[in-house]
Amino acid sequence: MSAVRQSAAKGTDVVDEGKPDSDEVRSEFTPPLGVDLPAEPEPEGSAFAPPSTTGTSPNTPPGAQAQAWFPAFTPPTGIPVVSLSKETPWPDRMRAMLRMSVTDRPAPEQAAERSEAGPPVPRVLDLTLRIGELLLAGGEGAEDVEAAMLGVAHAYGLARVEPTVTFTLLGISYQPSLIDPPVTANRTVRRRGTDYTRLAAVFRLVDDITTSELTLEDAYRRLAEIRRNRHPYPGWLLTASAGLLAGAASMLVGGGGPLVFLIAAIGAMLGDRLAWLCAGRGLPEFYQFTAAAMPAAVFGVLVDRFGHYLPGTSTIQASAVITGGLFALIPGRALVAAVQDGLTGFYITASARLLEVMYLFTGIVVGVTLVLYAGVSLGAVLDPQQSLSTYENAPVQLVAAMALSLAFAVLLQCEREVLPLATLNGGVAWTVYGVLHQDVGMSPVAATAVAAGLVGLFGQLLSRHRHASALPYVTAAIGPLLPGSATYFGLLGLTQGHLSQGAASLTKAAALALAVAIGVNLGGEIARMFLKVPGPVPATSDPARRRAAKRTRGF
């Protein structure tokens, strides 16, 4: 037999006579000689493999082709470390990392140095949750709580960690790798109280954890000391501060005379003691606020009915007495935190905080309205415009605004060195509001928003300078801007049957409260914009680097 084959080299016919085709055993599935086989299929690609570089320039280096033609893809060498300088305050560094996706976050620098066997995951998660609990219970915003939790976990070597904060629940999840199951833990915030001294201590602890070699044992010991520390001020001083706040507020709205100051202070102190009694009996905060609002309203009705028996009857104003008592009860701290959470995207927590504010405000309304109904039935005649009759004594009102901020700072348990700064910030806020509203003629809502914005700006600058939370410098300073008089006028209008006037005053009070909260948040954001913030290295320095994901671009 003979076989004819095509010569691959010369293209001529080659004849083999009397020789078999091959000594090998051939299968019927083997293609015959001279038949061109189809090209082998390309291997299936992976989602984690670098993209194809077809179409790039021949002179382009292979490592830079994918980045040059496909800038949106992950570089073949991985995501480079984002420049996060430790000279920047840890809230900014952790907030920048929190807004990245998990895969884009830089790896912990001290993961291998702290322990050769790896970080003790359960203990790190427990410490992280305990620190987050103290911050959330102290009134800190949800984003700052998540940033603190991320900073603690990242400092102890947990890279792939995701904290979650809601109104009363803290959660954290850690996944060692893509193939390992995640480790999760959570903690419920049962009790919440206002102690900004403890809040500042927790901030210092987080700063030491994120910037130094603080061991887990040392962190646990310091955290236990923070929890064991007593409040910086005794109970009698807190009660006296409530009286000072109410008296200063009565002078702020034009009460006039030391007698109005004294009566408003006594009513507020009685209300504070009633609230402490209700708290000791285990009653919810709703009933505490209801009981605390009653004494000021009772003293206002008594002044209206029997004030002519007292000396200086021409300067005694019942409306100023009640308004001063309301200033000490309006939940400005919770309102600012609620709006801040809503503006930063934590809508569930913001809704829960706003619901809390509504319940507390309803308790104040119930307490005051019950007393006003009884006073009107007994013949009390309360003039809604009476507290505005002497509203032009600027020096007295400035001193009253600063005294109000000082008393508010003591009630919030601020540190002693914070008290002068918070007092000065409150005086600046009231001065700005008075100039814009009385001299320039700006509307009260707009003037309040501008003054609150300056409060937030200065508070953020002070907190960055002292490496502490901004709440002690901000919350006390907004005291003079709270809508105490508008709230009282609304309640009085509803009590006297003037529904339209009452609804208009309450609407104005709500607008002023929102202006305060939004202004404070906007001032803080402006401070972050113009100060040095952490960010990625510019792409011009290295073409293999890319910017981190924005908040709305998590992939």
Image: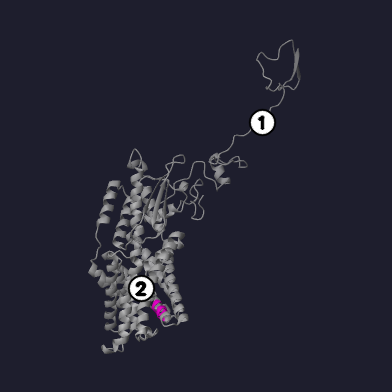
Residue to which mark 2 is pinned = 428
Q: Secondary structure at mark 1?
A: loop
In terms of image quadrants, where is residue 180?
A: top left
Position of residue 211 measured from the top left corner of the image (x, y, whole percent): 33, 51
> Measured along the vertical axis of the image, is residue 350 above or below residue 108?
below
- Depth check: 73 or 301 in front? 301
Residue to which mark 1 is pinned = 39
Span of residues in magenta:
487-492
Query: In this orientation, does residue 391 appear?
Result: no
The quadrant of the picture occupied by the N terminus is: top right
In terms of sequence position, does the residue under pointer 2 or pointer 1 come before the other? Answer: 1
Identify the amino acid type marked 2. Answer: Val
- Depth check: 89 or 254 in front? 254
Identify the amino acid type marked 1. Answer: Ala
- Depth check: 55 or 457 in front? 457
In terms of image quadrants, where is residue 240?
A: bottom left
Classify residue 396 as left or right of residue 545: left
Disc 1: CA contacts within 10 A as few (<14), some (14-19) or many (>=20): few
Asked whether the residues under the numbered discs 2 and 1 touch, taking CB atoms below 8 Å apart as contact, a structural biologist would say no
Position of residue 324 measured from the top left corner of the image (x, y, whole percent): 33, 77
In terms of image quadrants, where is residue 175?
A: top left
- Looking at the magenta stretch, what is its main secondary structure? helix
Q: Secondary structure at mark 2?
A: helix
